Amino acid sequence: MNPELSAIQINERGGVAYRRPRATDGLRMWQIARDSQVLDVNSSYAYVLWAVDFADTSIIAEVDGRPVGFITGYRRPDASDVLMVWQVAVDADQRGKQIAGTMLRELFSRSGVSAIHTTISPDNDASQRLFSGVARSLGLQFTREPFLEAELFGDSHEPEDLYRLSPA
Ligand SMILES: CC(C)(COP(=O)(O)OP(=O)(O)OC[C@H]1O[C@@H](n2cnc3c(N)ncnc32)[C@H](O)[C@@H]1OP(=O)(O)O)[C@@H](O)C(=O)NCCC(=O)NCCS
């Protein structure tokens, strides 16, 4: 196989391609986050930098050559076999097609981690359903604990609970 293609690792399922991000995806990642009207929107620069330096622990979902979803993640500094998922977003017109769930499972298998952590605010039902479903399909335990209190954020941000998807 062309070594460049194998490094990019494109997996196509149901007309959706799943691959590592690159710098040119950063702007679309920013647009998808902005358009979600739910996520905290970081600068476009932050997404470009993330797509470069954290490409191994992040993923893009693409339809007809256009990114329609992404996950940003990193390995926790004190537990490198744990993937911390920061943001997940899918364009509104592409939701409900298992794109977010497939991105998470792809990323889990590609990064070779043994557990996934994420933070979710108590009002985000979609996110809780997404992660509990992925935990079930991967045979991982799904637990929640208080993590970051609302007062830490200095704005109207909800608290963020820590969810762990870990081996039994
Ligand atoms: C959350 C989000 C990423 C889900 O994307 P998606 O591609 O539609 O999700 P999937 O189709 O893979 O669905 C995964 C699971 O979540 C559930 N789900 C998805 N959207 C839902 C919603 N609005 N309400 C309740 N459950 C929902 C699905 O029913 C599915 O559950 P199942 O596996 O038990 O059937 C998408 O709605 C989104 O971008 N939301 C705005 C940003 C956000 O809230 N991100 C999460 C916080 S970081």
Image: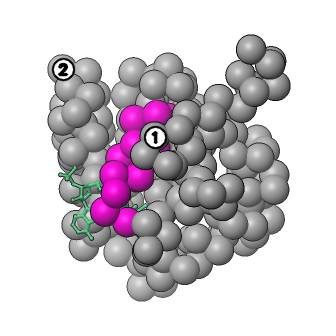
Which mark sits nearer the N-terminus, 1 or 2? 1
The image quadrant in which ligand 1 is located = bottom left
Q: In which quarter of the image is residue 146?
A: bottom left
Q: What residue type is labelled 1?
A: Arg
Residue at x-position 39% and y-position 21%: 114
In magenta segment, residue 97: yes
Q: Callout 1: helix, strand or loop?
A: strand
Look at the picture and state if 33 lies above or below 109. Answer: below
Disc 2 marks which residue?
168
Q: Give the range drawn in magenta.
A: 95-107
- Could you tell me residue 25's position as x and y percent? 74, 57
Q: Residue 148, position in %: x, y?
A: 38, 59
- Residue 47 showing in the rendered view: no
Report whether 158 appears left or right of 2. left
Please tell me which residue lies in front, 20 or 132: 20
Give the percent coordinates (x, y) of residue 105.
39, 35
At x 50%, y 20%, the residue is 112
- Residue at numbered disc 1: 13
Quadrant in which the C terminus appears:
top left
**Farthest top residue?**
1
